[in-house]
Image (spheres, rainbow, N blue to C red):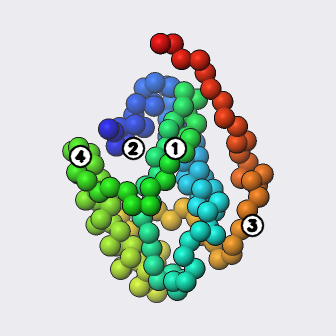
């Protein structure tokens, strides 16, 4: 298991350039997450008051040889188990930074929000409206393809 910094360095060494930022991998992963959540927005519990609840999701993403991200699955209750040194550090940081977002950021005035420390959390999308779901609007071609495996 690697941190995103370790993976970014691996990509630089493998591809000879910064695939994480300059190559767009980070932005493509963010767009994959946004598209996924927009695609299931009608499944969120609308009985709860808007802005008064939150949920943590875990996205399992595969990166192919062309450095394109593919969604494997989304976990609505990702494990926060310290299975490796990296997950121990990551899970601790996620829990600490989540409190910063839930308490410090959400209760701050609109004027103060830009200066609130949210740790490593980054707001990547915001919308006040429901998006009508049309598969073509996500710009994806949902086709199952395969390659022969050598056994």
- Which residue lies under the disc numbered 1? 72
Secondary-structure class at tag 2: helix
* Chain-order first, disc 3 or disc 1: 1
Q: CA distance from mark 3 to mark 1?
A: 24 Å
Q: Which mark is residue 4?
A: 2
Q: Are marks 2 and 1 in contact (CB under 8 Å)?
A: no
Q: CA distance from mark 2 to mark 3?
A: 33 Å
* Label 4 environment density (alpha carbons within 10 Å; few <14, some 14–19, many ≥20): few
When the figure is inspected, residue 91 is found, relative to residue 14, above or below; the finding is below
Residue 35 visible in image: yes
Q: Residue at x 35, y 68 (%)?
A: 98
Q: Residue at x 32, y 55 (%)?
A: 79
Secondary-structure class at tag 1: strand
Q: Which mark is residue 3?
A: none
Quadrant that contains the N terminus: top left
Residue 116 visible in image: no
Q: Where does residue 90 sit, x and y in percent of width and height?
A: 29, 53
* Chain-order first, disc 3 or disc 4: 4
- Which residue lies under the disc numbered 4? 83
């Amino acid at each position: 298991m690697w941190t995103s910094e370790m993976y970014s360095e691996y990509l630089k060494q493998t591809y000879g350039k910064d695939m994480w930022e300059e190559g767009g991998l980070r932005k493509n992963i963010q767009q994959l997450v946004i598209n996924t959540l927009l695609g299931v927005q009608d499944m969120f519990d609308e009985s709860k008051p808007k802005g008064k609840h939150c949920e943590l999701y875990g996205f399992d993403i595969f990166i192919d040889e062309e450095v394109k991200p593919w969604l494997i699955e989304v976990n609505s209750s990702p494990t926060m188990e310290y299975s490796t040194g990296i997950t121990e550090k990551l899970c601790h940081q996620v829990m600490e930074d989540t409190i910063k977002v839930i308490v410090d950021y959400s209760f701050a005035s609109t004027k103060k929000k830009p200066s609130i420390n949210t740790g490593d959390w980054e707001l990547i999308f915001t919308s006040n409206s429901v998006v009508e779901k049309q598969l073509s609007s996500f710009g994806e071609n949902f086709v199952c393809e395969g390659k022969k495996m050598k056994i």
